[in-house]
Amino acid sequence: MLGPVIGSALIILLPEIARPLAEYRQIVVGVVLVVVVIFTPQGLGDTFLAWLAHKRAHASGAPPFKPGKTTATATTEKNGDAYDCA
């Protein structure tokens, strides 16, 4: 639920931040939005959370987090068979 909040804030604040550019403001806002869409295909919220997890993992010495490439393995209690949850 973090993504819509960040997106709304960006849509509202970006024109105000670009206000000093006067006649080029709409072009700058459009370029920034296109760049955000191209470079953060998972969304701003997920990209921020992945960056934060990577930063925490790097600080603790754990292997880095790779979004979209995680798989979970679970076992059944009855016979212990493992299966992939991805």
Image: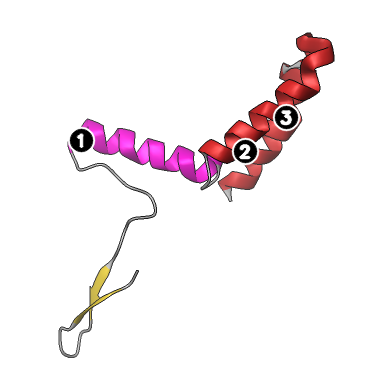
Q: Disc 1 residue type?
A: Ser
Q: Residue at x 84, y 13 (%)?
A: 23
Q: Are marks 1 and 3 in contact (CB under 8 Å)?
A: no
Which is more foreground, mark 2 or mark 3?
A: 3
Q: Disc 3 residue type?
A: Gly
Residue located farthest toward the bottom when viewing the structure as drawn: 78
Q: Residue at x 33, y 55 (%)?
A: 69
Residue 21 appears at what percent x and percent y?
77, 11
- Crowd class of label 3 (few under 14; some 14 to 19; many from 20; radius 10 Å): few
Which quadrant of the structure image shows residue 12? top right
Provide the residue designation for mark 3. 30
Viewport quadrant of the C terminus: bottom left
Residue 1 appears at what percent x and percent y?
58, 51
Pick the residue in front: 38 or 49. 38
Is 74 placed above or below 5 here?
below
Q: Disc 2 residue type?
A: Ile
Pick the residue in front: 81 or 23. 23
Provide the residue designation for mark 2. 6
